[in-house]
Amino acid sequence: MSFISTIIPTLNRPVGLASAVTSILKQKHQPDELIIVDQSLDELSYKAVKDIYSTFDVAPKLVYLHEPKVRGLIEAKQRGVEVAKGDIISFLEDDVVLHPRYFENVASIFASDQKILGCCGVMSNQKSGLIYEYLFRLFHRGIFYDARLNAGKIRDCNGNGVLIASRFLSGGISCYRKKVFESVKFDTLNDFFMLEDIDFSTRAADFFGTEFFFISTNLCLEHNMSPINRLKLYARWLRKLRENVLFYKKHRLKLFSFINFLWLLIGLLGESIVMSILSRSFGPLFGFLSGLIAGIRQKVVK
């Protein structure tokens, strides 16, 4: 049986973190180790976790790293990987609630085939309209093709789901064999945040082969999207565009990649205009333009 280490980066979200940890401790099949990388200046999150642990007789080993000097999601993940003892590394966000069979299904997936190197799950509370889904599939082509949206529609949290090969794995609901991190490192040089997960999984798929990475419709959780630390509309769109440009620069192949990129930009421009109208703010549109310029100007560090 695999040894599972679960890593949760957190920053100023003691309430959300408490709910996430509670859902982990309620699992019939718990991970063997829970690593929390806390970047908060205070100890509210630490106290919340200790209080929860005191109410459970059986719980995974707690490794609590209170490190305010660690800045950013990628550095926090990297710090967690450095201390993890498990041969399976599971990443979770600090505002999720797991399905009761989440880790039972994680263990089952990796035990079923030693060739599986990584997988991610689906959000059971993910909601998107038919028009959005159609447009998302229409504009995400080639190197931007993303199977995660379709996977969420066929989820089966009770263990009867399927595995779908994918280069894009969602970071806050992903699991990898630890040996992946021996060959592929997080990108700490290009200031990724929103797309750090698909940048990492794409490079892992390029190194090992796409056929070893999957979306599992068995792995289900609710993502409650805490408003704490969320970027405002302008900043969100600026970062979104800048990171999409950087992703293209890092992973472009030939002419078709450029065509895919231009096609995606058209779709994102349309989305930013719609969001600006709905929010009665120029934030999304101005963020799109600023992010596009910033991404074009920024040099990719390898």
Image: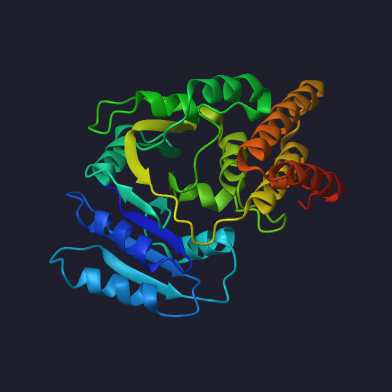
Q: Position of residue 122 (x, y in %)?
A: 40, 36
Q: Is residue 175 visible?
A: no
Q: Is residue 110 left or right of residue 187?
A: left
Residue 38's place in the image compared with 86, above or below, is below
Q: Is residue 131 left or right of residue 251?
A: left
Between residue 72 and residue 97, name the one nearer to us: 97
Residue 271's place in the image compared with 85, above or below, is above
Residue 76's place in the image compared with 24, above or below, is below
Q: Position of residue 170 (x, y in %)?
A: 49, 41
Residue in the picture at 50% in, 38% down:
169
Q: Position of residue 254 (x, y in %)?
A: 80, 25
Between residue 120 and residue 268, name the one nearer to us: 268
Residue 75's place in the image compared with 204, above or below, is below
Q: Is residue 223 visible?
A: yes
Residue in the picture at 22% in, 45% down:
100
Examine the image and state in which quarter residue 200 appears: top right
Color theme of the render: rainbow
Q: Is residue 261 left or right of residue 11?
A: right
Q: Position of residue 144 (x, y in %)?
A: 65, 29
Residue in the picture at 22% in, 69% down:
53
Residue in the picture at 64% in, 49% down:
233
**Outermost residue toward the left in this view:** 57
Q: How many marks?
A: 0
**Outermost residue toward the right in this view:** 297
Between residue 206 and residue 73, name the one nearer to us: 73
**Outermost residue toward the bottom in this view:** 42
Examine the image and state in which quarter residue 17 appears: bottom left
